[in-house]
Image (tube, rainbow, N blue to C red):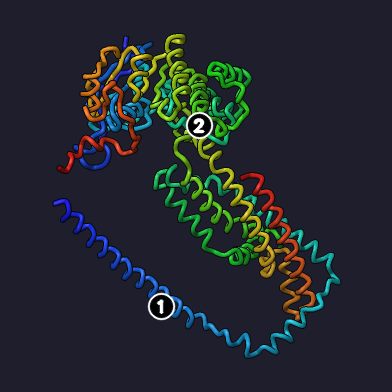
Amino acid sequence: MEPEIQIQGLSKTFGKKKNSGKALKDINLTIESGEIVALIGPSGSGKSTLLRHLAGLSCGDADSGEIRVLGQSVQCKGRLSRDIRKTRARIGYIFQQFNLVGRMKVMTNVLTGALGRVPGWRGCLGLFNAEEKALALKCLNRVGMDAWANQRASCLSGGQQQRVAIARTLTQKAEVILADEPIASLDPESARRVMEILADINSQDGRTVVVTLHQVDYAREFCRRAIALRAGEVVFDGPSEELTPSLLASIYGTTSFDVDGEPVKRRKTREPAKGFALAPAS
Amino acid sequence: MHSASTHSNLSGDQDNLLSRNWTSLLGWGIACAILAWSWGGAEMNPVALFADGNNMAVFAADFFPPNFHDWRLYLSEMVTTVQIAIWGTVMAVILAIPFGIMSSENLVPWWVCQPVRRLMDSFRAINEMVFAMLFVVAVGLGPFAGVMALFIHTTGVLAKLFSEAVEAIDPGPVEGVRATGASGLQEVIYGVIPQVLPLWISYSLYRFESNVRSATVVGMVGAGGIGVILWESMRGFQFAQTCAVMIIIILVVTSLDIASQWIRKRFI
């Protein structure tokens, strides 16, 4: 059987400089159905970029290979597949900044998860039927947000918004869930709650979950497998308990780790592949 | 080594400051030159306002007291004027939504965006009065010509304003909707429009206000509304009537401005 996620020879270059702008270098990975995988690595190592390519939100270089998810081609040689929307409907995506529509009700935000399934005209007019609404409420209930269904999404705290975003992917009936730094903008308590929900979706529903994290302790606690990226290359792929402090130090670079093996607080930058490519001046 | 680089940085900054002084001086020079150049072309003559002060006083005296004898007619024509503005604006809003989206760089490829933008530029470049004269010929005298004139011009204005709002949106929520497998149109409906709606409503109300003002003059070329009466009373030197009409226009325009301001506040 084909693996659930299959990446062959994916490269991505930002900007014109062929070497310094290289965010992903010839990535080859497979992820099997039902796995929960942590993608770790320092800031700018390419983990968010990789995840975006899996959902077809970004396109690789023209000399890239193919990405297949759920047996469907997502992109091949830097071009999105023609029926990408159908594949996207089966992939749930959770963003660091939640990406809910702030002025819409929580309920409407969750119902957008059904857009990939309902007939186009009905989706455009917002005519969701009772069954879809019941499902949306059930999903909100599962993440503990059903009491907020009629509030505007912008009224909620970060942790609440992220739970609503998870309810959106549940309504989507997504078979694979890709979570891009889902807890990076949350306080510790909300972060734990969100990770528990994601782990529960993996263990109860058997959904494949890929989550990028920069807290290594969360990766060890919630994910059996970890994949570490550094400078756009896979430098570790194995059971997360094998992530020893010395290994982490080599992944993150010695300076960015304190004695407990915890990464020093990262700064999120939009610029990919910065610090490592430019050699220090002196 | 280190101190040397600091030094060169400092002198670099000074160079920067000096050159900035020169460019700003040059900017002011150009601005003054343009003003002087336009003064000649526009035959600016403020002295005329005072030299013939007596004539002005006599002229102004003709306006008072205002003659409200035909106020029923004025009022009904003013209502027509507002009706012209309502339909001109509503039709423009409906058309400006697709055109506005099609001229937003962040949503459509350049080969859609650029032609639509140029078309909207041409809608906007021609004043309502010019369109009114054209439509009087095309659809005949009367308010409908006025509606069409306002409609075309306002579509051009609103499409530009709408697309500026769309280009300033947060792309995150749009991506959130895209990731669910939604279609392009659904991305716009769920991801874009909720974000821009308050601004769109506000712009549309602004344009309604200014369309009421414009509708008071399209009548001068025969396109209906109170402009017809205004023009005829002025041509007949009936300045007391002109004054009455102007007072009615001021009252109606002001009260609509207040009302639309009130509505706008509800939405933001």
Q: Where is residue A248 drawn, in percent x and y?
A: 25, 21
Rendered position, A78 above or below B14: above
Residue A100 is tagged as 2
Q: Are marks 1 and 2 on the same chain?
A: no
Left or right, A163 with reference to B263: left
Check disc 1 and report its element: helix, strand or loop.
Answer: helix
Rendered position, B248 above or below B120: below
Residue drawn at x 54%, y 25% as measured from the top left: A110
Q: Which residue corresponds to mark 1?
A: B33
Q: Where is residue A247 drawn, in percent x and y?
A: 22, 19
Q: Where is residue A182 drawn, in percent x and y?
A: 42, 25
Q: Where is residue B240 drawn, in percent x and y?
A: 79, 77
> Chain ID for label 2?
A
Between A141 and A17, the one lying in front of the other is A141
Between the residue at mark 1 and the residue at mark 2, the CA separation in whole angstroms equals 52 Å
Q: Quadrant of the C terminus of chain B?
A: top right
Left or right, B121 with reference to A135: left
Check disc 2 and report its element: helix, strand or loop.
Answer: loop
